[in-house]
Image: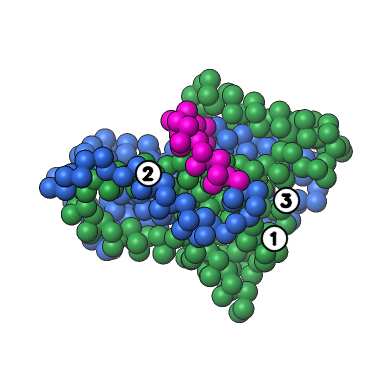
Amino acid sequence: MNSPTPAALFAAFFRIGITSFGGGLVAYLRDEIVTEKKWMTPDEFLAALEIGQTLPGLNSVNVAIIAGRRLAGPAGAVAAATGLIIPGAVLLVVLGLLYIRFHKNPDVAAALAGISAAAVGLLLQVTLKIGAKQFLNPLDLGFVLLTFALVGLFHVSLPVVLFLIAPIAIILRRPRSAGGQP
Amino acid sequence: MRELVSLLNVFCLLSLLAVGGGSAVLPQMEHETVTVHGWVSANDFATIYSLGQMAPGPNMTMVGLIGYKAAGVAGMLVVLLAFYLPSSFLTYAASHVWDSFQNNPWRNSIQKGMAPITIGLMLAGVHAVGKTASYNPHHSLHFNLITCGVGLAVTAILFAKHINPALLILAGGAVGWFFLRGI
């Protein structure tokens, strides 16, 4: 497997950062790293994704950090993450300045109301899609609704909720066989 | 200066609490930035979030705009660093030691146990943005019927067809411009 320089990593992730309109970033990353550049095998990428999903932070940024480190050390991790984030951040600055300048204009306000309404629909669809398994399992559904109620309705602080509920949820899913340790 | 420190505190914590992705901290972020600190209005928050969905790259880079509204360019940089650095450091460090945990049966338990909590948090995120953008008591029933309709239509279309969500959000903007002007 050929290993890229940090500059090559930055260029590759920058390209994803500028073309990945509409989310689904992990698929873009896989196409580039595994299919196009062949920097990682499918299994290596899957392993990186598993770590990225388990740890806090955005999955796409975490995968960029892990892949960057594997391929070019600390400089590679920085190059991959900044390449991914910078293009969108620059575009958002432009959009944000336009928003601050024009949001009182009735035409702009109406269009923005429609955009926000559509974004809620997108988030709802993503939630239902990736949560399909949890919504259909009574025990999981209980945790979904409990978390929703505590955080969404009663504004219990997130650290408190995680500290109280996560250990219970994890212990209920504890490894079945006691002799699982190799 | 005090504002920058508050921004740093809030977003560093959110970074480390973002279990299962950025959407999980949306309700807490809305509460902290709108209700507790008043950096942005509820309406700003909903709009900034949706602008973030249209931009390419990681969909939570929009947090930078909250920092910008709170404390200008310095606020934006502080928030972006605070939101991305802590979790990135953790991931960097953890990917070093991960291999020794790979066959540990508890890893699977953690993923299975955390999954419904992440989904509950995302649902709370839908509510956090939706209570301003979709079912807002300050707007007329007519207005709310249209915003809820747009949202549900987007959900249904995405389940039915493989289509770029950024295009649907733009279409939502067109529908809003046409139907929501002056009501």
Spatial CA distance of label 2 from label 1 is 35 Å
Q: Is residue B71 left or right of residue B121?
A: right
Q: Nearer the viewer, residue B64 or B141?
A: B141
As drawn, A57 above or below B113 = below
Percent from the top left, x then y, of residue B137?
Answer: 80, 43
Residue beneath label 3, please? B43
Residue depicted at x 80% and y 51%? A104
Q: Is there one chain holding both mark 3 and mark 2?
A: no
- Can you tell which of label 2 and label 1 is closer to the viewer? 2
Residue sticking out furthest to the bottom: B1
First along the sequence among labels 1 and 3: 1
Percent from the top left, x then y, of residue B165?
Answer: 54, 33
Display colour for chain B: green
Q: Which chain is blue?
A: A
Residue beneath label 2, please? A172
Q: Is residue A160 left or right of residue B31?
A: left
Q: Amino acid at mark 3?
A: Asn
Magenta region: which residues? Answer: A126-149
Percent from the top left, x then y, of residue B130?
Answer: 67, 42
Which label belongs to residue B35?
A: 1
Q: Is there one chain holding both mark 2 and mark 1?
A: no
> Neighbour class for label 3 at 10 Å: few (<14), some, many (≥20)?
some
